[in-house]
Amino acid sequence: MIDTVINGDATWETLKYVQYKGPEILKHVRDNLEKSVALKKISIEESSHFIELLDKTLLGYTYLGE
């Protein structure tokens, strides 16, 4: 049983420790998704869903996920 929860860092904060920047990652991924949609490799819905998941993941905590 967990008695006390101590909030950790969000995933994007942890990535900063190893020289990654959340906004740059999102831009790179979005650019590639747009190209994939244009080439009809994926649908717009798939692209939107992926971005939504990535946003949620980067904002989420590195510990005790839901």
Image (cartoon, rainbow, N blue to C red):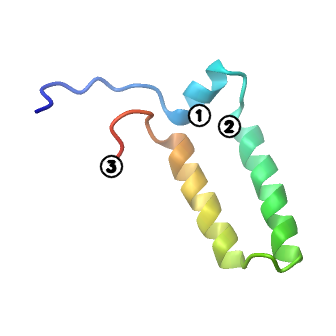
Task: Tell me how far mark 3 sits from mark 2, CA to CA.
Answer: 21 Å
The label number, if any, that marks residue 66 in the structure image: 3
Q: Quadrant of residue 62?
A: top left
Q: Is residue 15 positioned above or below 39 on the image?
A: above
From this viewpoint, which residue is outermost toward the top?
A: 17
Q: Does residue 51 appear left or right of residue 37 in this picture?
A: left
Residue drawn at the location 59% of the way across and 52% of the way down = 54
Q: Work out whether mark 3 precedes mark 2 in sequence or the reverse, and give the earlier one.
A: 2
Q: Quadrant of residue 48?
A: bottom right
Q: Given the image, on which type of amino acid does mark 2 rest?
A: Gly
Q: Is residue 66 positioned above or below 11 on the image?
A: below
Q: Which residue is mark 2?
A: 22
Q: Given the image, on which type of amino acid does mark 1 rest?
A: Trp
SS at mark 3 in the image:
loop
State if disc 1 and disc 2 touch (CB < 8 Å): yes
Q: Quadrant of the N terminus?
A: top left
Residue drawn at the location 63% of the way across and 19% of the way down = 17
Task: Tell me how far mark 2 sits from mark 1, CA to CA.
Answer: 5 Å
Q: Which residue is mark 1?
A: 12
Residue drawn at the location 78% of the way across and 63% of the way down = 33
Where residue 31 appears, as percent x and y from the top left, is: 84, 57
